[in-house]
Image (cartoon, rainbow, N blue to C red):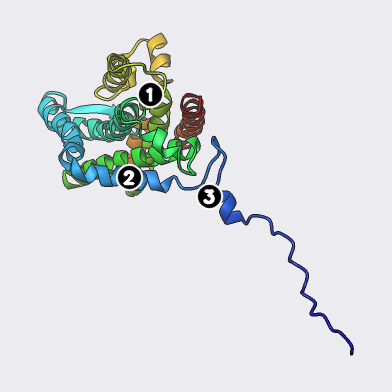
Amino acid sequence: MRHETATRPPAPAPSRPGAGLLLRVVPPGLYAGRSHVLVERSYLVSRRVWLQVVSGFAEPLFFLFSLGYGLGQLVTTVEGPDGPVPYAAFVAPALLAASAMNGAVYEATFNLFFKFKHAKVYDAVLATPLGPVDIAVGEAAWCLIRGGLYSGGFLVVMLGFGLVGSPWALLALPACLLVALGFAAVGMAAATFLRSWHDFDLVQLAVMPLFLFSTTFYPLSVYPGWLRAVVQCTPLYHAIELMRDLTTGHVGWDALGHVAYFLVMAVVGVALAARRLGKLLLT
């Protein structure tokens, strides 16, 4: 009798891990594409301290009322991008830019330092598939959102007081987001070099002169020639000039230079922050 044996089909060759698995198991130091998780975490935390977040709207309003309208009773007009403008209309775009800067810088420095040095949030994050680039991008995105909230609220106030004189002002909010991103990226990179809470005096030492001397309250023409060149190199000056151009309608090719300035700030800042966080957290 013929003996027949059942033949089993050959075992399939072991398949290579799929792209999804590779994205979930990422070596430390790489980008897992899940930075939005950190944005969600920051949002959930901010819901518990919403009063602290909302208080950021108040500072530029106080300056606008006290200086823009108070001092504006004595200083009627100031030389703007396209001729004399009321003093309140001169100050308001500068405060709009300062709102984007303050909201981004303080979020990027104080909160990042606390999460990094004390709460050890990033040590826990690196125990997941996320890497340092995810941390840098996620934190920069949240700083951008917070700076954009402050800027958007102040822009509504400007509209209510009639301090916007051109349809170009529709681009003011996207411009504020770019400004916030640039300052947030540099602020995160700077926060990785801070050693203790006492070092935050250096942050104030940088932010306060920018706020006071970047043509926020008076035009560039009041400076002597050598100091004028220094002011024109500062980031807040470029942000203020961009906001004044957009809100007054005096938009030229120099606006592209201001935009490029902050694009470079954002790219360099995020890259440096990611490198520093990777070096400090993975060693």
Q: Is residue 249 visible?
A: no
Confirm or deny contact between disc 3 and disc 2 (CB under 8 A): no
Q: Quadrant of residue 39?
A: top left
Query: Crowdedness of circle 3 by 10 Å Cα count: few (<14), some, many (20+)?
Result: some
The residue that appears at 56% across and 43% down in the rendered structure is: 26
Pick whichever, 11 or 1, lies toward us: 1
Q: Is 236 located above or below residue 145 in the figure?
A: above
Q: Name which residue type carries label 2.
A: Arg
The residue to which callout 1 is attached is 191
Q: Amino acid at mark 3?
A: Arg
Q: Residue furthest bottom?
A: 1
The numbered dot on residue 163 is: none
Q: Earlier in the sequence, mark 3 or mark 2?
A: 3
Which quadrant does the N terminus fall into? bottom right
- Across and down, in percent, residue 116 comes to 36, 28
Residue 36 horizontal side relative to residue 24, left or right: left
Q: Please report whichever mark, 3 or 1, sits nearer to the chain's N-terminal start.
A: 3
* Distance from the alpha carbon under mark 2 to that under mark 1: 20 Å
Dividing the picture into quarters, in which one does residue 206 lie? top left
Local secondary structure at mark 1: helix
Say which element carries label 2: helix
Name the residue tied to disc 3: 24
Say which label, 2 or 1, has the lower sequence index.
Answer: 2
Q: Position of residue 248 (x, y in %)?
A: 31, 40
Above or below, 95 relative to 151: above
Q: How many marks?
A: 3
In the image, which disc is placed on residue 41? 2
Looking at the rendered image, the disc whose residue lies closer to the viewer, 2 or 1, is 2
Q: Nearer the viewer, mark 3 or mark 2?
A: 3
Image position of 58 (left or right of 125): left
Q: How far apart, in angstroms, are the residues tagged by discs 3 and 2?
A: 19 Å
